[in-house]
Image (tube, rainbow, N blue to C red):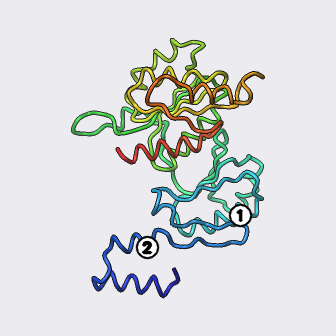
Amino acid sequence: MDKKRILDLLKNVSSGKTSAKQAYSLLKNLPYEDLGFAKLDHHRAMRKGFPEVVYCEGKTVQQITAIFKKLAKKSPTVIGTRVSKEAYKKIRKALPKLNYEEQARIVYLGEKVDGRRKMTKDRLPATGSLLPFLCVLTAGTADIPVAEEAAVTAELLGNRVDRIYDVGVAGIHRLIGNMERISKASVIIVVAGMEGALGSVVAGLAEAPVIAVPTSVGYGASFKGLAALLTMMNSCAPGIAVVNIDNGFGAGVMAHTILRLK
């Protein structure tokens, strides 16, 4: 849709010939911005509720920088995933306001929710109950990078996040000791490698929907996360969904989508 058609559409809305709902339906599928090496979807937030996120692995520093500059003109928050610290330092020379979350390997422009603050501060005044938030669990410390990708993604999309790490089934008393805290969450993300059993256990104990993330952490027979993936997909506990191996970003977006309904 070119400039003239957009102006004509707005005039029709102003005159009453076209309803606001009809105009929104037409505008939400506007064309992308073509950079040659990338086609930027500036209207994804209109359709999905969050802006386009840049998967940076495999892209050059110059490409990432150009994409970020274009997206920043249209959106207050720009997010890039799978960025090394070395690449971040190079990109930051052109974008001095760029932020970096090293464990999550996420770069971003804009603000994010401070998910590390005490959840007791986020209560509804009338009832004293907690505002909707998500809880991110890991089976082990080695799973934290994937968990942080999920947590930081969710925070950048405007959600509060409670982190509970290293509560795997090898010492299940650690999980049980945190169940009161976990049970208050509206959505739970469980990140686990090895055999991936933690997802099933949490889904069997908690009321909230569980998003399970298999990681590539583990010895040879874990097959770089395949064993955990199959365990999670074959869970007998209801209320559990599974994303791809090491896909913390996908889990964070899914949790955000669920929380938006709250």
Tag in front: 1 or 2: 2
Image quarter of residue 212: top right
Q: Does 222 appear above or below 79?
A: above
Within-10-Å neighbours for mark 2: few <14, some 14–19, many 20+: few
Considering the numbered disc 1 on the image, is that residue within a helix, a strand or a loop?
helix
Q: Earlier in the sequence, mark 1 or mark 2?
A: 2
Q: Is residue 226 left or right of residue 167?
A: right
Q: Measured from the top left, where is residue 181 in percent x and y?
A: 41, 24
Q: Measured from the top left, where is residue 258 in percent x and y?
A: 42, 43
Q: Is residue 225 left or right of residue 126?
A: right
Q: Measured from the top left, where is residue 200 in percent x and y?
A: 51, 23
Task: Check disc 1 and report the residue beneath it.
Answer: 94
Q: Does 125 appear above or below 214?
A: below
- As drawn, the label of residue 26 is 2
Residue type indicated by callout 1 = Ala
Within-10-Å neighbours for mark 1: few <14, some 14–19, many 20+: some
Task: Name the residue located 76 percent from the left edge and 56 percent from the top edge.
Answer: 90
Q: Measured from the top left, where is residue 178 in percent x and y?
A: 45, 20
Residue type indicated by callout 2 = Leu
Task: Name the residue located 58 percent from the left edge and 19 percent from the top edge.
Answer: 168
Quarter of the image with the C terminus is top left
Q: Toward the viewer: 214 or 151?
A: 214
Task: Name the residue located 73 percent from the left edge and 60 percent from the top edge.
Answer: 93
C-alpha distance separating marks 1 and 2: 35 Å
Considering the numbered disc 2 on the image, is that residue within a helix, a strand or a loop?
helix
Q: Toward the viewer: 57 or 227?
A: 227
